[in-house]
Amino acid sequence: MNDQKILNLFTIKSNWKWHILYWLFSACIMFFLFSNKDYNLQIRLSLVIFLITVSFLITLLVNRYLIHRYLFTGKLFIFTYLIIAIFIVTFWLISFSVILILTYSVLKLPDMLIPTRSEIVILVTGNYLLVIIAVVIHFIKESYRRLVEKNNIEKQKQLTEIKLKEASLRLLQGQIHPHFLFNMLNNLYGLVKEDAEGSREVIMKLSDLLDYMLYECDKPEVLLIKELKFIENYIELERVRHDENFNVKMNFPKKIGDIEIAPLILFPFVENAFKHGFHNPEKSFIFMEFSTENQIVKFAIENSTFEKSADKYLKQEGKGIGLKNIKDRLELIYKDKYSLDILNSEGIFKARLEIDLN
């Protein structure tokens, strides 16, 4: 609680109560320290009231105007120039006013003791010292307050970016899930008509896929072995649909370890390969290879394409999630830690993805 009060003391904007307290304290210092006690009380009070008033006005000008407008904006030369100008003007103003006060006092009170020149210099110097202290206190307090505000704004900005990133990821994943389900339900519908017994096996595999998508894909990361198993199950479902001439080859390692990766980060390449490149089983092919080394994941896929399907694949036409969403998701999750090379020519689509999981 005390730490919070101290923090508030340095971060809240200036309070008029603190100003009154400071200048009352300064007036007492001027009266008891910088003015000679042997002088007439009237002269001491007149000089102190006048000097404190001038000091307050100087401080108000510097703190409320010059520091904010010039010092905090980097205009140091103008700030220094104006400070020197204020010092010169106020010094002559104070000197002239002190002479007037002393002259008036001599005429009205000829028998009193008046200050000497050196004592006037001490009085004026003490006056400027109080101004400097007030300016330094305000500068430190205002600088700290601005630093706290800047840090709070930066934290709020980072929090907003994190929330935006999470929302974007949910949106991109949300585009993957219904797309996948739509394709698989269409596959199942066609299979039920042809092979009722085989459709039961498809339903079981689809159930496993849904279980993974519902209970694993909401996590920021999943075991890589589960992600690859998910892809293998999906390929097996496609094998049932394309029972003949299923030219699909996989080169996946059997032992991977406890490496974790973002869910469904590799699957869109596989799904799009079947969706856009497996129209004619006799001429179509898909080859995919996967490897890991020192927490670096390497995934390569190569598949046949057809002119119309390739255009949809690359331009994200129709209801396909396209490469744009794949790249957006990679950028959100693995910014500056991945590389993606894509080549589409002569009826062959190639993609090579490398992710540094360190």
Image (tube, rainbow, N blue to C red):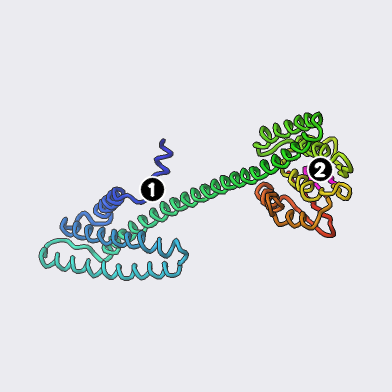
Which residue is the site of mark 1?
A: 12
Element class at badge 2:
strand
Is residue 155 found left or right of 44 in the rendered image?
right
**Residue 5 image offset from top left, x and y in percent:** 39, 40
Q: Residue at x 23, y 56 (%)?
A: 36
Element class at badge 1:
loop
Q: Earlier in the sequence, mark 2 or mark 1?
A: 1
Q: Is residue 347 above or below residue 292?
A: below
Say which amino acid is labelled 1.
Answer: Ile
Q: Main secondary structure of the magenta part?
A: strand
Question: In the rendering, which numbered label is found on residue 292?
Answer: 2
Q: Say which of 305 and 96 sits in front.
A: 305
**Residue 67 image offset from top left, x and y in percent:** 40, 61
Is residue 69 found left or right of 183 in the rendered image?
left
Q: Is residue 88 above or below residue 134?
A: below
**Residue 322 image offset from top left, x and y in percent:** 71, 51
Question: Is residue 358 something that shows in the picture?
Answer: no
Q: In the picture, residue 240 is in which quadrant?
A: top right
Q: Residue at x 73, y 50 (%)?
A: 338
Part of the protein shown in magenta: 287-301
Disc 1 packing (10 Å; few <14; some 14–19; many ≥20):
few
**Is the N terminus in the top left, top right, bottom left or bottom right quadrant?**
top left
Question: Is residue 204 something that shows in the picture?
Answer: yes
Say which amino acid is labelled 2.
Answer: Thr
